Amino acid sequence: MQRILFVCLGNICRSPLAEGIARERIAACCLDVTVASCGTAGWHAGEGADPRMVAAARAAGHDLSAHRARQLRACDYDDFDWLLAMDHDNLAELRKLASSPAQLAHTALFLEWTGIAPPTAFPDPWYGGEADFAAVVGLAERGVAGLIQRLQK
């Protein structure tokens, strides 16, 4: 079984979106893969996904209502096969916190790892409007499609 952790800053926008879409699509493909998400910062631990992200995801047919944010833990490096960062800053943080070369080798940018480019970094819609949230839903769907293709190989 593969285990994948999506990582963004607060775990209320990008990474829960990727997790939610991946969970749906992985189940539909009957793949033996577990997914989760977290943030490198703990400001929103225990909170649900950002309401704007929930609404944008819902409009595209994805349900993020069960999500609860959590912060990255040291054990995540051992509990997951891949830690996929949503942007370069979070990737740098993942790499800084890795305690071994093996842990470091299992960190990557989500979109780059899934073969979706450009962009390589997943934009944060936090300061944007409704259109920005809708746009990242489409990007997450493309990224997850690439993830599924990679996992099926």
Image (spheres, grey):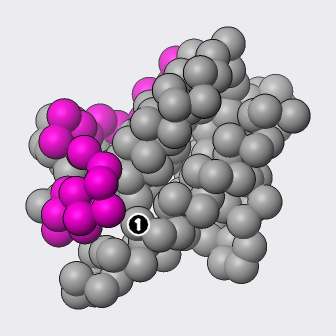
The image quarter containing residue 78 is top right
Does dot 1 land on a helix, a strand or a loop? helix
Read off the residue under disc 1.
137
Q: Position of residue 80 (x, y in %)?
A: 61, 23
Residue 25 visible, this orientation: yes
Residue 95 visible, this orientation: no
Could you tell me which residue is drawn at 62 percent across and 38 percent down? 83
Q: Which of 100 and 140 is in front in this view?
A: 140
Q: Nearer the viewer, residue 126 or 24?
A: 24
Name which residue type carries label 1. Val
Disc count in the image? 1
- The residue positioned farthest toward the top in the image shown: 1
Q: Position of residue 46 (x, y in %)?
A: 15, 35
Classify the position of the C terminus by image quarter.
top right
Q: Where is residue 59 in the image (x, y as percent from the top left)?
A: 23, 65
Seen in the picture, residue 129 relative to 52 is either above or below; the reply is below
Seen in the picture, residue 22 relative to 49 is either above or below; the reply is above
Relative side of 122 to 128, left or right: right
Q: Does the magenta stretch include residue 65?
A: yes
Residue range corresponding to the magenta coloring: 52-78
